[in-house]
Amino acid sequence: MNSKAEQLRNLPAVDEILRDQTIGDMSTRFPRAQLVQWVREAIEDCRTSILASNILEGSEVKFDEHPEQLAQSIVDRVRVLGEEQNAMALQRVINATGVLLHTNLGRAPMAQRAIDRLQQATGYANVELDLGSGKRSKRGARATQLLAQLAGTDDAVVTNNCAGATMLVLQAIARDREVIISRGQLVEIGGGFRLPDVFTSAGVKLREVGTTNRTYLRDYEQAISEQTGAIIRVHRSNFALTGFVSEPAIDEMAAIQRPNSVPVIDDLGSGCFTDLSSLGLSEPTVIDSVKSGADLTLFSGDKLFGGPQCGIIVGKKRWIEKLRGNPLMRGVRVDKLTLAALEATTEIHLGDHAIQEIPVLQMMFESPEVIRKRCQHVCDCLPRIEGVDLSVVACDSQVGGGSVPGSSIPSFGVRMGGGCIEQIASGLRAGKPAIQARVAQDAIIMDLRTVRDGEIEWLLSRLRQTLQAVSGHA
Ligand SMILES: *Cc1c(COP(=O)(O)O)cnc(C)c1O
């Protein structure tokens, strides 16, 4: 056994590693400065290990006798750093989880018409230019016009997301005053953000009324004072409250006697324009909210609306004008790509084929039988691998993304059981396109409700590749 000093002397130089073939191949994808930094890090890690004398632990290789092995382990380390970097790059993922609005996967996939329109806006575009007169125009004028038309309101405004929309509304309308809200609606949305915190950061004071499970109309009525700036209802979008529960409907809230300066705001979150009752789901629609008399109705663009990420506010002109004039409007405005995709998505909703054209809706209304056949096809096309049993099983798809909590839609999935589940799941995530499946205790279930026909060939080729790799190692 050589001394630590000798081992340290055997450490390769940075240049030596950079001349390696593997590292050379990586230089087409990564800048040289990045590679040099990784090589330095890898050598440094190795040095630390030698000093700690644990470099040989659990290893057959005697680095001190084989300096080339030491170099190879450094190259391997750099290759792993590169792979980690590649995996972090934003890329296409096939969603085999069956969760339609998967926040971790970017919620709603966009409609083809929206993608085409977005593409047109990537260069110069008439974002604030009236091509008729050649004069400056109002940003997003057409999108908001279409949205107002769709919702049946006087006007509309668009922000970066629904949380931003809420902040804008409260800041512009109720700043330094009280906002009345039911205790049953003080919800936490994704990413650890709590709506009460979002609200108060807009400079309003919450006036909580009722209890967690029951809030009455009179609770709201009694809370109204000179301090009141607004009354808000927040749709419980990511959890269900059942049992001894009660709260007034939005039309009853809109009918509350109140000063002219106090609007009723309806934060719907999911922004549904489609009747989901045939699926056994009940989700309040934007149109119902507007018809019920809400002054402002807020929803996300990338939930059941099926468009790009944005916040949409529809409602009465006098309130929308106040929003447009607020300085925060400039801080939450959307870019041209969002506007382009939003315009196209709204056009689809205004037409007669929303369910066929909007992917989220199309997948949602897909019959279980069609999905079962898709699963059978995938199952039939896959090689049989020792130790992995394949079958088609019934499962449940979730709407997700803060919509229709606690409800599910019957579906089918391809089940892969056996010993190497984790290995298969990580193999599926590692290639291109990446595949995210559902991993249960003893099996992977790929719910094919959220995998579209155009993705099946990709799915198959990635599955074949991954199964073969796993069987090769077995
Ligand atoms: C999802 C949701 C939000 C947040 O919407 P983002 O577009 O993600 O900002 C706010 N309120 C409700 C009720 C929601 O469901």
Image (tube, rainbow, N blue to C red):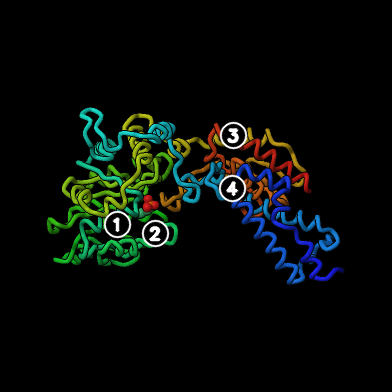
- Amino acid on which the number 2 mark rests in the picture: Leu
Which residue has dot 1 on it?
A: 167
Q: Is residue 367 left or right of residue 385?
A: left
- Which mark's residue is nearer the viewer, 3 or 1? 1
The numbered mark, 2 or 1, whose residue comes first in the sequence reads 1
Marks 4 and 2, how far apart at CA: 53 Å
| Residue in view at x 42 percent, y 33 percent | 119
Q: Is residue 366 rendered to the left or right of residue 327?
A: right
Query: Does dot 1 land on a helix, a strand or a loop?
Result: helix
The answer to whether mark 4 and mark 1 are in CB contact below 8 A is no
Q: Residue at x 35, y 49 (%)?
A: 160
Q: Position of residue 87 (x, y in %)?
A: 59, 49
Residue type at tag 4: Pro
Q: Nearer the viewer, residue 363 or 218?
A: 363
- Residue 72: x %, y % from top left: 76, 54
* Element type where label 4 sits in the image: loop
* Front-most of residues 96 and 373: 96
Answer whether residue 311 is visible to the viewer in this image.
Answer: yes
Q: CA distance from mark 4 to mark 1?
A: 41 Å
Residue under numbered circle 2: 241
Distance between mark 4 and mark 3 Cα atoms:
35 Å
For the residues bearing labels 3 and 2, Cβ distance under 8 angstroms? no
Q: Pointer 4: what residue?
A: 31
Instruction: Tell me which numbered mark, 4 or 2, is placed earlier along the sequence.
Output: 4
Foreground tag (4 vs 1): 4
> Could you say which quadrant of the image residue 69 lies in?
bottom right
Binning the other alpha carbons within 10 Å of mark 3 as few (below 14), some (14 to 19) or many (20 upward) gives some
